[in-house]
Image (cartoon, rainbow, N blue to C red):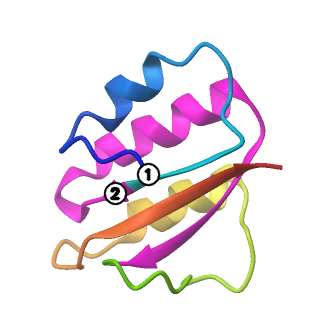
Amino acid sequence: KIDVEGYEATVLHGLSRPLAALSFEVLPASRSRALACIDRLAALGTYVFRSSVQETLVFTEPDWVDVEAARAHVRALPDDARSGDLYARLA
């Protein structure tokens, strides 16, 4: 898990190759940061995604979704939604 209080995209931009799997926090108030993370991962490789609310470790989707569905999920979060985690793994 990348947990660097808003600097997740900066960390991901430091990668020169894809990681097999990782997770990072998503805050509804900082959607652009989460979208930047998704974009960086997509540039590194073909990833699939799942999410969970807060630290429940319970996935909100029944299966892994592609990058477009992950972006749509982040964009659709209500402003008052709780924080959560986005999990990514190479497809």
Q: Mark 2 and 1 residues: CB-CB less than 8 Å, in contact?
A: yes
Q: Is residue 90 magenta?
A: no
**Residue 4 left/right relative to 12:** left
Q: Is residue 36 magenta?
A: yes
Residue 1 circle label: 1
Note whether 59 is above or below 91 in the view shown. below
Q: Residue at x 26, y 71 (%)?
A: 83
User: Horizontal and vertical percent for residue 8?
Assistant: 33, 37
Tell me the residue at 34%/78% (across/down).
Answer: 55
Pick the front one: 43 or 71:
43
Type of the residue with mark 2: Glu
Tell me the element at label 1. Answer: loop
Q: Which x, y percent locates residue 49?
A: 64, 60
Vertical placement of residue 78 versus 20, above or below: below
Element carrying mark 2? strand
Q: Is residue 70 left or right of residue 8?
A: right
Occupied quadrant, residue 37? top left
Residue 89: percent from the left, percent from the top?
A: 70, 51
Q: CA distance from mark 2 to mark 1?
A: 8 Å
Q: Residue at x 24, y 41 (%)?
A: 4
Looking at the image, is 6 positioned above or below residue 65? Answer: above
Q: Which residue is mark 2?
A: 25
Image: magenta residue range: 25-53
Height in image: 77 above or below 17?
below
Q: Residues within 10 Å of mark 1 (few under 14, many from 20)?
A: few
Using the rendered view, name the quadrant where residue 59 is placed.
bottom right
